[in-house]
Every structure is written in structure tokens, then in C-alpha cells.
Amino acid sequence: MVRLHLRPAIWLMAASLLLSLHPMSAYSASKTALVLGDSLSAEYGLVRGSGWVALLQERLQREQRDLTIVNASISGETTSGGRTRLAALLEKHRPTLVIIELGANDALRGLSLNATEENLREMISAAKKAHAKVLILGMQIPPNYGPDYTQKFSRLFATVAKETHSPLVPFFLEKVALRPELIQADRLHPTAEAQPLMLASVWPTLQPLLGK
């Protein structure tokens, strides 16, 4: 029997050849970010392509970042609905980043804060198990829901973010909420002019998650 003794250099050449045969490796595959939100991210009342998510994709393209945004937001969505849909979305899109913008409709409907918190935790856990980073967009509600409910609702985002070690934008609408001219006639949804400001609130916390 003839035994071949390949030198280390030959092994390296062979390994390089094998890697070249797999163009869809983790290093060359296009990356995806999934936005799981409600009407604030679903362009409610706006011309298609003018919302903050679309503006984010445009910015990424200008900066030549290899990241495609999948906007899976639905008007009226709650944390329960997002939790139900997330598994299929993770399987389909395999995102490297998940942006969770949910909770406002829970509060508007007076739903259980414990349920909202549990749903957020489960979504974060599912995303991280799928090897995706997570960014949480926190919300606040008007004081007419009562000071106790209002304060607890606001704090739950910070609590979940801290305990799950997830980056948080404390108040997604911070730059527009107190400017009536940036709110649509329904007194709930931001106008097209507000969308760049919403992106400006997200960008500083989002940018470090994108890498170089």
C-alpha cells in the first residue's frame, strides 16, 4: 500500500479550495434585519415607502451596508400577535437582527402588563435562540390611562431590556410625541414629516448592532 504524506502547505491549499466551493457561507450570505412592529412601523396613513423603516433601508444603502430590511409590521398588532408570528418569520428570513416595536396596542386596549412583559421576553428569547441580535423600541402612553398603569407600562420595557441584556430605545416617539404638527388627524399616528425624527431616535442605538 502506498501512503501519501501531504505537506502542511498542500493541506492549506486543499482547505482553501473547499471554502471556495461554498459561496453561500456565513461570510458571504446577505444579512437580514426583521422589524416586528405595529402601525407605527407599518406606514399607517402614509404613502408607501415613506415610513421610518423604508428610510432606514435607504440609509443603509447610502452607507453601503450589506443589510436587507424585512418589515413584518402590521397595523393593530399586539405583543401577543407578534409572539405568535415570530417563529415563522425567523424560520423564513433567518435575520441577524430583530427590531421589536410592539406594546402600544396592548396599552391602548388596557391589556395585562404581565402578559405584555411575558410576550416581549418570549420574543427576545426566540430571536436570540435563532442567533439574532435584538433591539427593543420602548413606548409610553398618555397619563389618562391612570398614573399607576402608565408608569408601570413605561418601566416594563426597561426591565425586560435590562434582564435580557438587550439594547433599548427608551421612547420611540420621543422626538415627535409632544409636537401636534407631526401627528396625523387621528391624534395617534406620526406624519410623513415625523418619520426621519423617528429614525433619528432609533439610529444611535441601532448603529452599534450593525457592525462595521
Image (spheres, rainbow, N blue to C red):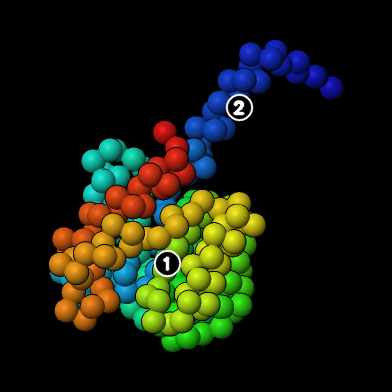
How packed mark 1 is, by other alpha carbons closer than 10 Å (few <14, some 14-19, many 20 or more), is: many
Residue 191 place in picture, x, y as percent:
18, 67
Foreground residue among 145 and 62 = 145
Q: Is residue 170 above or below residue 18?
A: below
**CA gap, disc 2 to disc 1?**
50 Å
- The secondary structure type at the circle numbered 2 is helix
Q: Which disc number belongs to residue 15? A: 2
Identify which residue is drawn at 42% across, 47% down: 205
Residue 99 place in picture, x, y as percent:
44, 59
Identify which residue is drawn at 36% across, 52% down: 202
Foreground residue among 144 and 14 = 144
Mark 2 or mark 1: name the one nearer the start of the chain. Answer: 2
Amino acid residing under circle 1: Met
Foreground residue among 64 and 2 = 64
Q: Which disc number belongs to residue 139? A: 1
The N terminus: image quadrant: top right
Which tag is nearer the camera, tag 2 or tag 1? 1
Question: Can you tell which quarter of the image residue 189 is in?
Answer: bottom left
Amino acid residing under circle 2: Ala
The C terminus: image quadrant: top left
